[in-house]
Image (cartoon, rainbow, N blue to C red):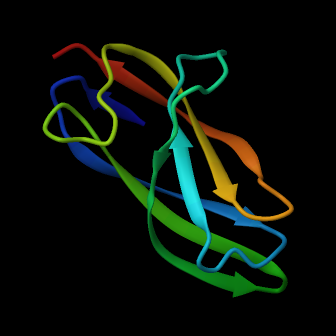
Amino acid sequence: MNIRADSTEYVKSTISVDHDITGKSIQVALPTTNTSPSTWVDAEVLGTVSDAGIWTSTYRILIGPAAGDITLTAGTYDWTVKVIDSPEVPVRKSGVVVVTPS
């Protein structure tokens, strides 16, 4: 995904796992490329569906300087997601966000 540094918008994604994550919290981190996540924000879970033993949750966060969950400067970031579950807590890099200058 590409976004301008001065834009504020919802970014939506999905995560699929092999166990029921209905009602579980999802968090997102956007560390700079090839670094470990240190700051996580709670995502808004929009829904979870199951199909043939796979559960897929759709979620979103607000990125940007106008009251966003995360404000990013120009650069490249790894979209990292985790599901708060027990005993499993899956953490996955699931994409790249490129932020261009304003």
| Image coordinates for residue 40, horizontal then vertical, percent | 52, 39
Instruction: Establish if 76 lies above or below 70.
Output: above
Image quadrant containing the N terminus: top left
Residue 36 percent location from the top left of the image:
67, 21
Q: Which of the pair 4/71 is nearer the observer?
A: 71
In this picture, residue 52 sits left or right of residue 99 = right
Q: Could you tell me residue 43's position as x and y percent? A: 45, 56
Whole-percent x, y for residue 81 in the image = 61, 46
User: Which residue is more in the foreground, 88 or 32?
Assistant: 88
Q: In front here: 15 or 98?
A: 15
Q: Is residue 32 above or below residue 91?
A: above
Relative horizontal placement of residue 91, taking residue 22 as reference (left or right): right
* Snapshot quadrant of residue 34: top right
**Dividing the image into 4 quarters, which one contains the C terminus?**
top left
Residue at the image position 86 percent from the left and 62 percent from the top: 87
Q: In percent of the image, x 58 and y 17: which residue is there? A: 33
* Apparent side of residue 65 relative to residue 69 in the rendered image (left or right): left
For image coordinates 80% across by 65% down, the residue present is 86
State left or right for residue 99 relative to residue 13. Answer: left
Most distant residue in the front direction: 86
